[in-house]
Image (cartoon, rainbow, N blue to C red):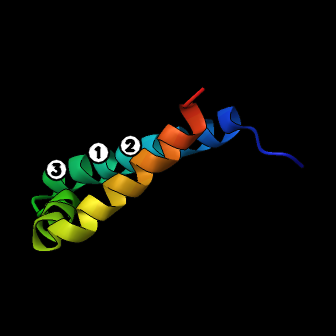
Amino acid sequence: MTFTPESVLSLIATAFALVAFLLMLEESIALSAGRDPMSNNVRAAVRRFPRVTYALAVVIGMLLGHLLWP
């Protein structure tokens, strides 16, 4: 089995879309139930560890740049 840059990019985009969808679904369920959504915890973690968040963004950018650079 070989992985092309297009297939890896597609998998990454699908994973991010799935995570975003699940966070939105959980937020709508939490708000209708009257409790705090999980996205508040994600937001707090990002603010608590800004260097890790920045490093993750750099790694994702390097991966996408490597796959998409001609």
Report if the CB atoms under discs 2 and 1 are less than 8 Å apart: yes
Left or right: residue 32 compared with residue 12: left
Q: Residues within 10 Å of mark 1 (few under 14, many from 20)?
A: some
Q: Amino acid at mark 1?
A: Met
Callout 3 amino acid = Ser
The mark closer to the camera, 1 or 3, is: 1
> In the figure, 5 relative to 32: above or below?
above
Which residue lies under the disc numbered 2? 21
The C terminus: image quadrant: top right
Query: Which disc, if any, is residue 66?
Result: none
The residue sitting at the top extreme is 70
Does 27 appear above or below 10?
A: below
Question: Callout 2: few (<14), some (14-19), or many (20+) C-alpha neighbours within 10 Å?
Answer: few
Residue type for callout 2: Phe
Q: Is residue 67 above or below residue 70?
A: below
Disc 1 target residue: 24
Count of marks overlaid on the render: 3
Observer-nearest residue: 51 or 18? 51
Q: Measured from the top left, where is residue 66 in percent x and y?
A: 55, 42
- In the image, what residue occupies the spot 20% across and 57% down? 39
Q: Name the residue located 10 percent from the left edge and 66 percent from the top edge.
A: 47
| Kind of element beneath mark 3 | helix
Residue identifier under label 3: 32
Q: Residues within 10 Å of mark 3 (few under 14, many from 20)?
A: few
Q: Nearer the viewer, residue 2 or 42?
A: 2
Residue located at (11% from left, 67% from top): 44
* Residue sitting nearer the eye, 10 or 28: 10
Asked which secondary structure carries label 2, the reply is: helix
